[in-house]
Image (cartoon, rainbow, N blue to C red):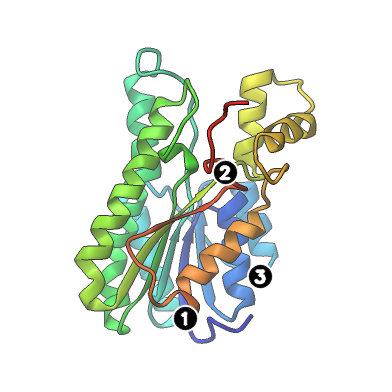
Amino acid sequence: MDDFAGKVALVTGTTGIGRAAALRLAAGGASVLACGIDAAANADLAAAGIRVQRADVSVAEDVAAAVALAVQAFGGLDIIVNAAAIHPFGTVVDTDAATWARCLAVNVGSVYLTAHFGIAHIAARGGGAIVNVASVQGHACQQNVAAYVASKGAIHALTRAMALDHAAAGIRVNSVSPGSIRTPMLAHAARKIDGDDVDVEAVFRRFGAAHPLGRIGEPEEVADMIAFLAGPHGAFCTGADFRIDGGLTAGLGVR
């Protein structure tokens, strides 16, 4: 677990996958700064020993401040994990313009901003890694999630562009595309689909049954993939998307 000794990581999102990624990198020896806007999640992660900065990752000034704090506190920057996201529901007809813009700003704009302010610092250390959390919904999608799907497909494309643009600086850029993972976002989806008073665990079991492995995934399983891509074992991986979806997108849903 000591792949990251001496490394500095910035992680966006302090719930779900972001939380798990921050803890996994720290367990591997990295100095981690996590940032997000959920006060309770920020406090919980800080209590677990992670340095946390409140930041709206769609706001340039907040992201610039978070990057600067990581560099100031820990001496540089080697790894960025972009896990912050929101998940609105709606078609392009019933999604209002503000919701559309907010989804793209948080889910995709944050990837741009962390790279915009962070890449020079990573390059100054001789290279490093960026891992963007996308989704299987960037490959194949449900109905009624137009903005979310657009944002995740954009992350796939932006990952490829960044990988090509910054390979010469020794910076590897990859994405991960999780299926259904036990996170607050998935619980929100369960309530959105089945109602606020739904038995969330029962919905999770139904979601899991759609995956060939027969269950939903855990945030720590995604965090392990992120750690692989961010660390030395993923040294020849760049410009790619790695699905961690229990086989969900491997086949056709025809029986």
Give, as a three-letter code, the residue at label 3: Gly
Along the viewing direction, whichever of 45 and 104 lies nearer the viewer = 104
Q: For residue 59, say whether it is visible.
A: no
Question: Where is residue 14 drawn, in percent x and y?
Answer: 57, 54
The disc, 2 or 3, on the residue closer to the chain's N-terminal end is 3
> Are there few (<14), some (14-19), or many (20+) residues within 10 Å of tag 2?
many
The answer to whether residue 76 is left or right of residue 205 is: left
For the C terminus, give its image quadrant: top right
The answer to whether residue 67 is left or right of residue 227 is: left
Question: Where is residue 35 drawn, in percent x and y?
Answer: 49, 57
Along the viewing direction, whichever of 211 and 61 lies nearer the viewer = 211
The disc, 2 or 1, on the residue closer to the chain's N-terminal end is 2
Q: For residue 162, say whether it is visible.
A: yes
Give, as a three-letter code, the residue at label 1: Pro
> Are there few (<14), some (14-19), or many (20+) residues within 10 Å of tag 3?
few
The answer to whether residue 206 is left or right of residue 186 is: right
Q: Secondary structure at mark 3?
A: loop
In the rendered view, would you say 160 is above or below 5?
above
Q: Nearer the viewer, mark 3 or mark 1?
A: 1
Q: Which quadrant would residue 79 be assigned to in this image?
A: bottom left
- Which residue is found at the position 58% from the left and 81% from the top? 29
Q: Which quadrant would residue 27 be assigned to in this image?
A: bottom right
Q: Which residue is mark 3?
A: 49
In the rendered view, would you say 172 is above or below 132?
below
Q: Which residue is mark 1?
A: 232
Along the viewing direction, whichever of 46 and 242 lies nearer the viewer = 242
Q: Secondary structure at mark 2?
A: loop
Q: Which mark is residue 179?
A: 2
